[in-house]
Image (cartoon, coloured by chain):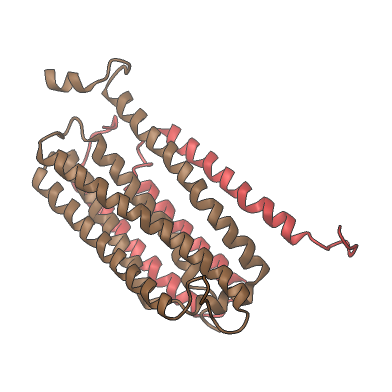
Chain colours: A red, B brown
């Protein structure tokens, strides 16, 4: 029900394209896991997952062409999520860096 | 036209505003869901940072083939769900029913594989409990499996609820509640189902694909 005219054929084409991309990325993430990339393994897996997530959100969940308020709200949600992950890590990773017991 | 007018609640200026408000409301809910799963993901990140090697060893008890298969099934169900919303928008009632049923079947396949995996883990003694045993470093491997069962269990619960919602939508559609001017519940159900797919897109590499090269 967006302001733009709805094009059924283009929509179906976009859905199938996204599905194909998601399949390729799934194959890619499994293949990458079996290659030793050192510390990069996890970064690659998360980068691929994030790309897949953006594709699903933009096309399947109609963020593209939808209200910009949705994008603003989700961004603030992800920001909150990053804080939730980052602050415990800040604590965990900074323990004993001074070499003083209890600091 | 009178029927269309009756669907517009009096506190909205027009149909588009009503539709935007409904989808925004769903996105508000979905962000609370990010936080819901986020708490468990934080536990995962903290424990994996603390015991990276143990998490890799524990993760190798999971079957990559089943995990990959389930990922493909769930992404497939997202495609059929998107097609269901598309059919609803064009008021193609039969296609909507077919795509909804396909989505429910694919969702059930996912849950079936998950049930098989759970049973297997249970028999291997990998369910955190009195009889938990996973070889060396059992205490910390237990952390991985606690997080594994909590995350995938919460995810599977969401899928069961999603299938229930789809049954309601299917019934509403068969009663002729939707047409091209109003199909908002189908769109909202789609958002929910795609979100469940999104969660799995992250869970799959986090749980199944840790240091597989080693």
| Residue located at (46% from left, 65% from top) | B149
Q: Vertically, is B120 above or below B177?
A: below
Q: Quadrant of residue A16?
A: bottom left
Quarter holding the C terminus of chain B is bottom right
Residue extending farthest front: B130
Q: Residue A89 is drawn in which quadrant?
A: bottom right
Where residue B38 sits: x, y (%)? Answer: 53, 51
Nearest the camera: A34 or A101? A101
- Does residue B28 appear to the left or right of B50 in the view shown? left
Residue A10 visible in the shown view: no
Q: Is residue A34 left or right of residue B94?
A: right
> Where does residue A66 sit, x and y in percent of width and height?
36, 36
Q: Is residue B172 left or right of residue B18?
A: left
- Outermost residue toward the right? A100
Residue B138: percent from left, percent from top = 60, 78
A103 up-or-down from A69: above or below: below
Residue B62 can be seen, yes or no: yes
Q: Quadrant of the N terminus of chain B?
A: top left
Decide which of B94, B44 is in the foreground and name it.
Answer: B44
Which of the two residues, A32 or B211, is positioned nearer the viewer here? Answer: B211
| Figure label count | 0
Q: Residue at x 83, y 63 (%)?
A: A96
Percent position of residue B209, x then y: 49, 73
Q: Is residue A37 above or below residue B99?
A: below
Q: What residue is at 27 percent from the left and 53 percent from the top?
A: A15
């Amino acid at each position: 029900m967006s302001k733009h005219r709805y094009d059924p054929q283009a929509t179906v084409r976009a859905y199938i394209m996204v599905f194909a991309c998601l399949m390729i990325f799934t194959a890619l993430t499994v293949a990458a896991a079996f290659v030793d990339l050192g510390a990069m393994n996890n970064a690659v897996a998360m980068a691929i997952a994030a790309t897949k997530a953006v594709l699903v959100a933009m096309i399947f969940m109609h963020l593209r062409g939808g209200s910009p308020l949705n994008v603003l709200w989700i961004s603030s949600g992800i920001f909150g999520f990053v804080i939730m992950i980052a602050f415990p890590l800040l604590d965990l990773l900074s323990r004993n860096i001074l070499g003083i017991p209890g600091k | 036209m009178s029927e269309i007018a009756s669907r517009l609640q009096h506190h909205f200026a027009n149909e588009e505003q009503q539709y935007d408000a409904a989808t925004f409301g769903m996105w508000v809910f979905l962000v609370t869901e990010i936080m819901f799963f986020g708490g468990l993901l934080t536990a995962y990140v903290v424990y994996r940072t603390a015991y990276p090697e143990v998490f890799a060893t524990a993760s190798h008890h999971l079957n990559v083939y089943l995990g990959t298969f389930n990922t493909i099934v769930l992404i497939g169900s997202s495609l059929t769900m998107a097609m269901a919303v598309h059919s609803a928008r064009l008021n193609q009632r039969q296609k909507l029913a077919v795509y909804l049923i396909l989505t429910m079947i694919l969702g059930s396949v996912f849950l079936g594989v998950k049930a098989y995996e759970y049973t297997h883990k249970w028999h291997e003694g990998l369910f955190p409990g009195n009889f938990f045993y996973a070889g060396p470093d059992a205490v910390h491997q237990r952390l991985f499996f606690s997080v594994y069962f909590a995350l995938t269990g919460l995810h599977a619960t969401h899928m069961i609820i999603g299938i229930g919602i789809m049954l309601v939508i299917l019934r509403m559609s068969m009663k002729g509640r939707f047409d091209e001017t109003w199909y908002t519940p189908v769109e909202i159900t789609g958002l929910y189902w795609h979100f469940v797919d999104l969660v799995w897109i992250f869970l799959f590499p986090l749980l199944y694909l840790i240091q597989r090269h080693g």
